C-alpha cells in the first residue's frame, strides 16, 4: 500500500536515537505556487511539469525518486522544471532536488541551451517553519521559497533585472509516497533533527554568481 509521507519534514529539533535502513521514495508530487514575476519575464513549463489547480500560477513537479534516510534524505524531480523567458534569452531551472537538512532546493541551470551549473542551490526553505501536515498539503502550499544569492545572480545577469536579496519565489508543498514498514517510517522521519552532514546526488559542477 502506497503511503503519503505526511511526516516527511519534521522540525529539526527531533533527533533519532538509533539508525534504521533507508527507505526508497517511489513517487508523489511537489506543488509550487509561484509569486508574480518581474515585468518582462514569461514563465514556461519544462518536461513533465504541469499546471496545478487554483488561482495564479501553480506548478506540479512529479517526484521521480529519492531516499528517506534521516538527514541524508533527498527528493528528486528528474525531467521537469520551469523556464523564464525575457526577450531572446531563456533561463531554465530543472531537475530539482529537495534537501531538507540543507534548507535548500537544488537544481540544474541552463541559459539559452548551455548548461551553467548542476545541483546549484536555487531556493532557500525553512522546513521547520511549518507543521509536517502543512508541508504535505498540496491544496495549500505554505513552505516559503526564497531565491538564493546564486539564483538572484543568474536572473539579474540573464535579464538585466535587479532583484532584492531573499526575493520570494513562491510557496511549496511536497507529498512523496513510499512503501515502508510502519516502524521503519516512524524511526526514519525523526532523523531530520540531526544536522551537519550533507549527501548530494552528485558534486557541484559550477557555482553561479
Image (cartoon, helix red, strand yellow):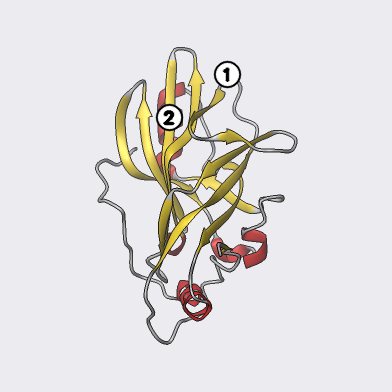
Gap between marks 2 and 1 measured at Cα: 16 Å
Label 1: how many Cα within 10 Å (few below 14, some 14–19, many 20+): few
Q: Position of residue 163 (x, y in %)?
A: 53, 34
Q: Quadrant of the C terminus?
A: top left
Instruction: Say above or below: 177 vs 52.
Output: below
Q: Residue at x 62, y 58 (%)?
A: 136
Q: Position of residue 102 (x, y in %)?
A: 42, 60
Kindly identify which residue carries mark 1.
40
Give 79 or 171, whichever is nearer the viewer. Answer: 79
Q: Position of residue 184 (x, y in %)?
A: 46, 78
Label 2: how many Cα within 10 Å (few below 14, some 14–19, many 20+): many
Kindly identify which residue carries mark 2.
92
Label drawn at residue 169: none
Give 155 or 57, whichever is nearer the viewer. Answer: 57
Q: Residue at x 57, y 66 (%)?
A: 128
Give the mark nearest the N terminus, 2 or 1.
1
**Residue 119, quarter of the rendered image:** top left
- Closest to the camera, between mark 2 and mark 1, is 2
**Left or right, residue 74 beside residue 82:** left
**Left or right, residue 167 beside residue 24:** right
Find the residue positioned furthest to the right: 55
Q: Residue at x 31, y 56 (%)?
A: 200
Give 57 or 4, whichever is nearer the viewer. Answer: 4
Find the residue positioned furthest to the top: 88
Secondary element at image label 1: loop
Find the residue positioned furthest to the front: 1
Instruction: Say above or below: 49 vs 159.
Output: below
Amino acid at each position: 500500500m502506497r503511503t503519503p509521507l505526511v511526516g516527511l519534514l519534521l522540525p529539526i529539533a527531533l533527533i533519532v536515537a538509533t539508525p534504521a535502513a533507508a527507505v526508497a521514495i517511489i513517487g508523489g508530487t511537489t506543488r509550487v505556487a509561484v509569486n508574480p514575476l518581474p515585468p518582462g519575464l514569461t514563465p514556461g513549463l519544462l518536461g513533465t511539469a504541469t499546471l496545478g489547480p487554483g488561482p495564479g500560477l501553480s506548478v506540479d513537479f512529479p517526484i521521480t525518486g529519492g531516499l528517506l534516510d534521516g538527514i541524508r534524505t533527498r527528493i528528486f524531480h528528474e525531467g521537469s522544471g520551469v523556464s523564464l523567458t525575457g526577450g531572446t534569452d531563456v533561463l531554465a531551472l530543472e531537475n530539482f532536488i529537495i534537501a531538507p537538512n540543507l534548507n535548500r532546493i537544488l537544481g540544474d541551470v541552463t541559459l539559452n541551451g548551455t548548461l551553467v551549473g548542476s545541483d546549484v542551490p536555487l531556493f532557500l526553505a525553512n522546513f521547520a517553519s511549518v507543521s509536517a501536515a502543512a508541508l504535505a498539503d498540496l491544496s495549500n502550499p505554505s513552505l516559503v521559497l526564497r531565491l538564493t544569492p546564486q539564483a538572484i545572480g543568474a536572473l539579474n545577469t540573464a535579464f538585466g533585472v535587479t532583484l532584492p536579496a531573499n526575493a520570494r519565489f513562491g510557496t511549496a508543498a511536497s507529498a512523496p509516497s513510499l512503501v515502508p514498514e510502519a516502524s521503519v517510517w516512524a524511526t526514519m522521519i525523526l532523523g531530520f533533527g540531526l544536522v551537519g552532514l550533507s549527501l548530494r546526488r552528485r558534486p557541484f559542477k559550477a557555482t553561479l554568481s
